[in-house]
Amino acid sequence: MKKLINLLPVILLYTLFANSATAQKPVPQRSWPSVALGMPEEWYGSEESKKVADNVLLYQRDVGGWPKNTPFHKPLSEGEKAQVLEDKDKPDAIFDNGATTTEMRFLAKMYSKTGNDIYKVSFEKGLHFILEAQYKNGGWPMFFPLRKGYYTHITFNDDATFRLMNLLKDIYTKKPTFDFISDKKTTSAIKKAWDKGLGCILKTQIVVNGKPTVWCAQHDEITLLPAKARSYELPSFSGSESVGLLDLLMDIENPSPEVIRSVKGGIEWLEAHQMKNIRWDKFTNAEGKKDHRIVTDPNAGSLWARFYDLDTQLPYVCDRDGIKKSTLEEIGYERRNGYSWYSDGPRKVLDAYPKWKEKWGK
């Protein structure tokens, strides 16, 4: 017992060191989203965080948004900084892959910790960018200013609209990190944008035989109908992008009858279109390459396809030739392994639905 007591300081020190080492994984080795949103609260406002913030400010485009898939947290050489400055007017500000909303949330954290107005000014510029980019019908394109092609479609893909709507809601409901946005004119404009966004979500929901179902990953900005994006992203019911939209709707306090009907229809569609007892399996194929396949497994849960045919409502996959196929084996290696064809994401909203239904479903 005495030996154990003597060892307690050592054990405690080791535990603290291990936890600290895990928490303090070097910033450059982390992903940008984990740095922007997932660091210990005391890190925001530190000297290291300010250096990261300098990069975020530097990368902000003249229009107010940010490019995507950029490691803002990694150190830049003087030459790289000069290039970023030169690219300030580049038309690549985007909402895809968490771009713009992630940087704005980071800047809000920095302002709340430091009170440095440079972060507030940058955040407000990003906010103006979001409000300006919104269509009159309430949707958002992928890029702004607009680019020709599928980029002009209302973008639910990769939760772009979901992230925008959540950010706007956090601002107008005055969540602590965002309470510095207090001007009534601004908060009124934000609430109006959120209401328009909600209207767009409800109007774009695919209706079959008079009943709301789910959404496509992108919808035409004029007709509001499901629209094509890349060659293998055809108009469809989406088993992935619909999850965030339903989550958003289920989070509304005092939902309207229209919202309640929308949620019930979407949940029922997902419930009916789950593929039970299958796994999206990784394996090594006959050529010695990492590959994917669907495996039947009585112990597995449910998966949902990324895409379901608009006519048959059956799941499909697709190669770059744009031809729908029923099985993974029918498409080439590159697309088979280079895209998220299946997801268990809908399980989240299905699990939350009984509690929501008890409150609002009656």
Image (cartoon, rainbow, N blue to C red):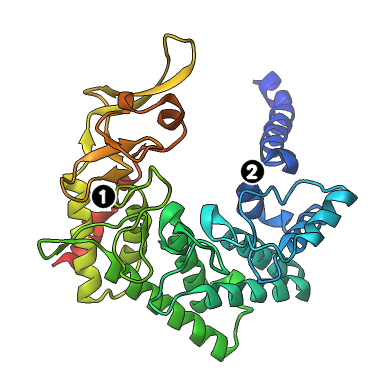
Mark 1, residues whose alpha carbon is within 10 Å: few (<14), some, or many (≥20)? some
339 on left or right of 242: right
Q: Specify whether residue 194 is in view.
A: yes
Residue 50 x/y as whole percent: 80, 59
Dot 2 falls on a residue whose secondary structure is loop
Residue that mark 2 sits on: 31
Residue toward you, 90 or 4: 90
Marks 2 and 1, Cα distance to the nearest angstrom?
29 Å
Kind of residue at badge 1: Leu
Residue at the far left in the pictured view: 209
- Residue 304 percent across, percent down from the top left: 28, 40
Q: Amino acid at mark 2?
A: Ser
**At x 38% / y 69%, what residue is drawn?**
221
- Write down the residue under mark 1: 350
Dot 2 or dot 1, earlier in sequence: 2
Image quarter of the N terminus? top right
Q: Is residue 174 visible?
A: no
